[in-house]
Structures are given as C-alpha cells and as structure tokens.
Image (cartoon, rainbow, N blue to C red):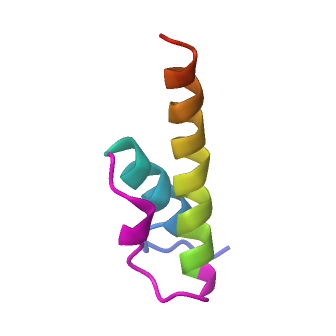
Amino acid sequence: MIMTTDPDPFEQGERAARENIPAGANPYQEGSEQYALWASGHERVASAIEANEGEGT
C-alpha cells in the first residue's frame, strides 16, 4: 500500500462544510474524481448540519 501525504478531497469537503464554506468553493476541476469526492464530503456534513438545525437544537 502506498502512503501519500496528499489531502483527501472527501475529508477536505467535510472540513469545508463544517467551516461554513459554500459548496461552490470546491477547489477541484469540475468533472474530476477529486471534485466529486470533495462535493460528496461537503454534502454529507452539510446535510447533517441542516438536519440538526431543523430539529430546533
């Protein structure tokens, strides 16, 4: 297994959502695998945040 120090786009997207960075700020080229991973990570966290806010907590 090759270990890399490259940041994981999925984790970057999750972090961006936690920091209230909009999905449109995706730093990767649209259509690339990294773009899709970043967007998936962002959506996962953003959806969880919205669900929590919707519960009135």
Q: Quadrant of the N terminus?
A: bottom right
The residue sitting at the top extreme is 57
**Residue 36: percent from the left, percent from the top?**
62, 74
Does the magenta stretch mainly form a helix, a strand or a loop? Answer: loop
Counting from the top left corner in percent of width and height, residue 35 is at: 54, 78
* Residue 20 vs residue 3, the one in the foreground: 20
Q: In the displayed structure, would residue 43 be above or below residue 37? A: above
Q: Which residue is drawn at 50% across and 12% down?
A: 56
Residue 24's x, y, as percent?
Answer: 41, 69
Task: Determine the image quadrant of residue 25.
Answer: bottom left
Image height of 10 relative to 57, above or below: below
Total labels drawn: 0
Q: In this rendered view, identify the residue nearer to me: 39 or 12.
A: 39
Would residue 35 be counted in the magenta stretch? no
Q: Which of 54 and 3 is in front in this view?
A: 54
Q: Which residue does the image show at 62% across and 61% down from the upper left?
A: 40
Q: Left or right: 52 with respect to 15? A: right
26 inside magenta stretch: yes
Q: Name above or below for residue 56 compared with residue 38.
A: above
The residue positioned 60% from the left and 69% from the top of the image is: 37
Stretch in magenta: 20-33
